[in-house]
Image: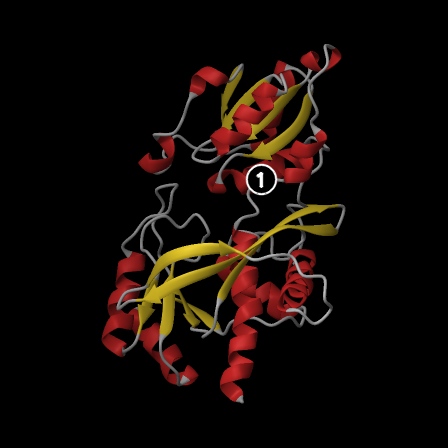
């Protein structure tokens, strides 16, 4: 029935959102960086915003004996990110001052750059720009809807543009706009969050009525992202019933491979979700299996988003 179709749609849509959000580090670049030879010591690998889980990437590159340069996109990022900063593991440190050309020249002044890799979510956009400016492998920063790989609103708009299943949504600068959208949509609950994947505070809100929706929009608007900028708008999206999946992928030259699949077990609350656990899902090569249906949709999303 309609509920079953809604759940099936939820499977692929939720999978795509969670999966694309994880595309922080271009893993094919890392995989191509084998242990550095003596000749490679004249080159450097630049890691943009090497914070949080990016430290494991840095450790791996150090094991492979690559000279490393840290590029810090901003000095005013969220304290939770900056508390993981470890300058002692880098041979060079560059602070980006808002001018890509100047940062490129600063990197070139060190030594030839072998690769540019994002080390955490706030560094994704700058890593794309630097890699393109240096003629290195990376995601195209000039593609359609430039920020669709990390902006949750633009991501869904891009999927809709190319005819893929996408969430009904609206960017709201006031509670009144959100209430109007809820009235047009005609269904509850609604999800409210910051539009950026590095949105920082504001949280994820599951709203079952108008009062909860109003409070959630205000909470998001009063929060700041990891860069310290205000989240002036709130992203309001329809809620999809069904199981949430995460699909980790590696992409190179437009070809996508599945690295792992996960199913999320969560409990809805008055203000969001409690994730009880995340379980691995075994690979299944059967054409009509849920895994293959997920993979096909995810690959279409990756291609549409320019990954």
Give residue 124's quadrant in the image.
top right
Give residue 161's quadrant in the image.
bottom right
Residue 172 vs residue 276, the one in the foreground: 276
Name above or below for residue 78 compared with residue 173. above
Count all numbered tags in the image, as a single digit. 1
Label 1 Cα crowd, 10 Å radius (few <14 / some 14-19 / many 20+): many
Residue drawn at (60%, 57%), measured in percent from left and top?
A: 282
Identity of the residue furthest to the top in this view: 38
Residue 138 visible within the image:
yes
Q: Secondary structure at mark 1?
A: loop
Residue drawn at (42%, 73%), measured in percent from left and top?
A: 239
The colour mode here is secondary structure
Q: Position of residue 302 (x, y in %)?
A: 65, 56
Q: Position of residue 190 (x, y in %)?
A: 37, 73
Residue 215 vs residue 288, the one in the foreground: 288
Residue drawn at (32%, 35%), measured in percent from left and top?
A: 79
Q: Position of residue 64 (x, y in %)?
A: 63, 20
Q: Position of residue 225 (x, y in %)?
A: 37, 47
Quarter of the picture holding the N terminus: bottom right
Residue 247 vs residue 265, the one in the foreground: 265
Which residue in the structure is indicated by mark 1? 25
Name above or below for residue 301 compared with residue 137. below
Residue 282 vs residue 80, the one in the foreground: 282
Residue 106 visible within the image:
no
Give residue 175's quadrant in the image.
bottom left
């Amino acid at each position: 029935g309609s509920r079953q179709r809604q759940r099936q749609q939820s499977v692929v849509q939720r999978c795509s959102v969670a999966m694309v959000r994880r595309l922080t580090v271009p893993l094919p670049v890392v995989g191509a960086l084998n242990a550095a030879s003596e000749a490679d010591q004249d080159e450097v690998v630049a890691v943009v915003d090497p914070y949080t889980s990016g430290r494991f990437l840095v450790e791996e590159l150090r094991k492979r004996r690559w000279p490393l340069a840290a590029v810090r996109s901003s000095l005013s990022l969220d304290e939770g990110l900056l508390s993981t900063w470890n300058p002692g593991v880098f041979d060079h440190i560059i602070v980006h001052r808002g001018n890509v050309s100047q940062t490129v020249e600063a990197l070139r002044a060190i030594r030839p750059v072998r690769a540019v890799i994002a080390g955490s979510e706030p560094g994704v956009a700058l890593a794309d720009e630097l890699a393109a400016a240096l003629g290195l492998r990376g995601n195209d920063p000039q593609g359609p809807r430039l920020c669709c790989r990390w902006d949750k609103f633009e991501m869904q708009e891009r999927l809709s543009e190319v005819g893929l299943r996408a969430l009904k949504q609206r960017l709201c600068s006031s509670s009144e706009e959100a209430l109007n959208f809820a009235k047009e949509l005609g269904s509850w609950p609604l999800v409210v969050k910051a539009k950026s994947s590095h949105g920082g505070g504001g949280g994820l809100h599951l709203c079952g009525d108008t009062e909860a929706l109003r409070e959630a929009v205000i909470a998001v608007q009063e929060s700041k992202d990891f860069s310290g900028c205000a989240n002036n708008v709130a992203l309001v999206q329809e809620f999809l019933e069904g199981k949430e999946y995460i699909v980790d992928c590696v992409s190179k030259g437009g070809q996508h491979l599945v690295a792992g699949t996960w199913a999320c077990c969560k409990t809805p609350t008055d203000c969001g979700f409690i994730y009880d656990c995340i379980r691995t899902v075994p690979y299944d090569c059967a054409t009509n299996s849920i895994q293959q249906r997920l993979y096909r949709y995810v690959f279409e999303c990756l291609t549409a988003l320019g990954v």
